[in-house]
Amino acid sequence: MIEEKILQTISNVEPCDNLEREHQKDAIVWIKSGAEIWRTKKPDTPPKHLVCYTAAVDINKKSLFMGYHKKAQLIMLSGGHVDYGETLLQAANRESLEELGVKRPVWLNGGQPILITQVKTVGKTAGHIDVDLWFAFKANSASDNFATSELMREMENPRWYTFDEVLNLSVNPKNLETDPHMHRFIEKLKKVIIPN
């Protein structure tokens, strides 16, 4: 069953802090409850559903490809909703192809999500809960330009951001500039690409 594969993937995420542990535990309970986990109708049915981020990462330059998401009204990574019947990695592969034009991403972390978070959405489709799985793949900021028509439909001014630039974006709810968990993602990503 697909739900069992999704549960296994989520269970295999090693939480970096108590917040991730809480989000992981809640997601597991939610999926086991039999609730609908895939978005069935835009923008927010059911009011809690699965989403994948697909971060293009230049390991050497320590940078991410991001842009201003028109609906969220924040600077975001590429990604999108998990379609009905997809595993998380299948969704990440589809999103990387649709939005970034990458046919065979070289996934970091063995193709497993680096982070799991939950967030109440903001912007033009505010108010529902996204259960976010953060995937990342290797890219090259010198040669990779992901300005596909699908990406440009969803984002403005996509470009490479250094980790330091991302960490300077506000995650304060009063002055939010990016996903509120973005700084936590950067810190966890660093542990994946710069092992001790």
Image (spheres, rainbow, N blue to C red):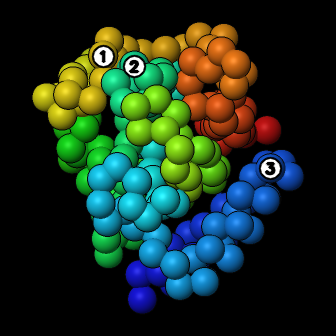
Left or right of 31 in this view: 14: right
**Picture coordinates of residue 162, whole percent (x, y):** 54, 14
The residue beneath circle 3 is 19
Query: Which of the two labelled residues, at mark 1 and mark 3, occupies the earlier sequence position?
Result: 3
**Picture coordinates of residue 193, whole percent (x, y):** 62, 36
CA neighbours of label 3 inside 10 A, class few (<14), some (14 to 19), many (20+): few
Mark 2–mark 1 CB contact (< 8 Å): yes
Q: How many marks?
A: 3
Q: For residue 169, what is the image quadrant?
A: top right
For the point 40% across and 31% down, the residue is 124
Left or right of 171 in this view: 126: left
The residue beneath circle 1 is 156
Asked whether residue 174 appears in the rendered view, the answer is: yes
The residue beneath circle 2 is 68
Q: Is residue 136 above or below residue 86?
A: above
Query: Given the image, on which type of amino acid does mark 3 rest?
Result: Leu
Query: Given the image, on which type of amino acid does mark 1 rest?
Result: Glu
The residue lying toward the viewer, choosing from 141 and 127, is 127
**Of helix, strand and loop, which one carries label 2?**
strand
Query: Given the image, on which type of amino acid does mark 2 rest?
Result: Tyr
For the point 65% across and 32% down, the residue is 180
Measured Cα–Cα span from mark 2 to mark 1: 5 Å
Mark 1–mark 3 CB contact (< 8 Å): no
